[in-house]
């Protein structure tokens, strides 16, 4: 066990002290939201994509809410959400100890308050949170996640950390969503980024545990291309049917981000208004990221 880890009674690693970067594999130093957030990530292995930033822009959080991210990686989604909405109580779950340690470093670098990173399997969250005295309750107003989705029989990544972050067992998606339902308060929101090929399975898993009123947002790489990734936002106990909202085109023909994408990725604007029933597309001036 690394010096920055400790274990709870059931053997899970929880709430280690913040390590130094020298304790971890080599990292790169960058920023998010146009320089507003300092952000380290590992040079090799899993690298942060657009999904955490886009999910953070979709969560209908308000000051004082409790928010959990499952599979928080190095903390990009939590940091972007806290930059948009003040006074949130944030909890990140990350199964890889080194990645969880890096998330803590990023939180310290950005003076992120009221944020806890818990190391462990999200499917054991109830027991782990119950054994974590720093977290007074584990009923959350909002949960967000980019679940693992690569098949068990898919070719393994040469980077173990990347492979662990992306590989799913046959029941992984159902187990994660069932866990989310147990952690969400009634009418709390669930936001996920998933491949479009898993959309039907995801909606069925949500319906099974009373997560409904789903809103589906396609993410188009370029105008006229199919959406390989979609965002889903739904509510615990929601009874309305699913809706497909106006999607987001990410890139222009020259490869640069569209103004609408830049408004989110650089300026930290929400993807839609706070209301589930009144979506609006954000827009903003074009600037280089």
Image: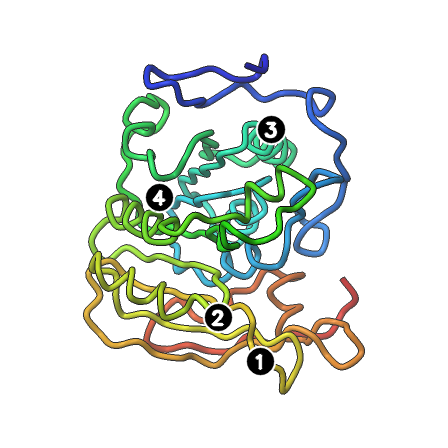
Q: Residues within 10 Å of mark 2 (few under 14, many from 20)?
A: some
Q: Which residue is drawn at 63% across and 87% down?
A: 224
Which of the two discs, 4 and 1, labels the residue nearer the N terminus? 4
The residue beneath circle 4 is 66
Q: Are discs 3 and 1 less than 8 Å apart at CB? A: no
Residue tagged by mark 3? 98
* Image position of 224 with respect to 76: above or below: below
Tag shown at residue 196: 2
The answer to whether residue 135 is above or below residue 67 is: above
- Earlier in the chain: of badge 2 and badge 4, it is 4
- Residue position marked by numbered label 1 in the rendering: 226
Residue 30 on image: x %, y %: 75, 45
Q: What element carries label 3?
A: helix
Give the Cα distance between marks 4 and 3: 25 Å
From mark 2 to mark 4, how far is it between C-alphas?
A: 28 Å
Q: Earlier in the sequence, mark 4 or mark 3?
A: 4
Nearest the camera: 215 or 63?
215
Quarter residue 43 falls in? top right
Badge 1 or badge 2: first in the primary sequence: 2
Residue 38 visible in this rendered orientation of the protein: no
Task: Kindly identify which numbered label has been placed on residue 145.
Answer: none
Element at badge 4?
strand
As displayed, is residue 116 above or below residue 38? above
Where residue 68 appears, as percent x and y from the top left, is 40, 44
Mark 2 to mark 3 CA distance (whole Å) = 30 Å
Q: Give the percent coordinates (x, y) of residue 58.
A: 46, 63
* N-terminal label among 2 and 3: 3
Q: Do the residues labelled 4 and 3 touch (CB within 8 Å)?
A: no
Q: Distance between the residues labelled 1 and 2?
A: 9 Å
């Amino acid at each position: 066990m690394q010096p920055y880890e400790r274990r709870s009674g059931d053997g899970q690693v929880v709430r280690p002290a913040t390590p130094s970067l020298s304790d971890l594999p080599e990292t790169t130093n960058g920023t998010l939201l146009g320089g507003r957030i300092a952000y380290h990530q590992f040079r090799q292995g899993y690298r942060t994509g657009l999904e955490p930033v886009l999910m953070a822009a979709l969560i209908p959080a308000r000051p004082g809410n409790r928010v959990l991210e499952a599979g928080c990686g190095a903390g990009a989604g939590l940091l972007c959400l806290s930059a948009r909405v003040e006074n949130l109580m944030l909890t990140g779950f990350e199964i890889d100890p080194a990645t969880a340690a890096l998330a803590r470093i990023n939180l310290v670098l950005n003076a992120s308050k009221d944020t806890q990173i818990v190391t462990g399997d999200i499917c054991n969250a109830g027991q782990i949170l119950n054994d974590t005295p720093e977290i007074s309750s584990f009923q959350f107003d909002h949960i967000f996640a980019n679940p693992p989705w690569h098949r068990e029989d898919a070719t393994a990544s040469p980077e173990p950390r990347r492979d662990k972050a992306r590989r799913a067992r046959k029941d992984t998606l159902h187990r994660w969503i069932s866990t989310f339902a147990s952690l969400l308060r009634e009418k709390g929101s669930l936001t996920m980024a998933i491949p479009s090929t898993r959309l039907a399975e995801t909606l069925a898993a949500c319906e099974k545990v009373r997560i409904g009123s789903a809103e589906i947002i396609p993410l188009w790489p370029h105008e006229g291309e199919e959406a390989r990734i979609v965002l889903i936002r739904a509510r615990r106990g929601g009874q309305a049917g699913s809706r497909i909202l106006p999607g987001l085109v990410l890139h222009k023909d020259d490869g640069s981000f569209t103004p609408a994408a830049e408004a989110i990725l650089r300026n930290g604007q929400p993807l839609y208004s706070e209301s589930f029933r009144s979506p609006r597309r954000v827009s903003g001036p074009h600037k280089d990221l």
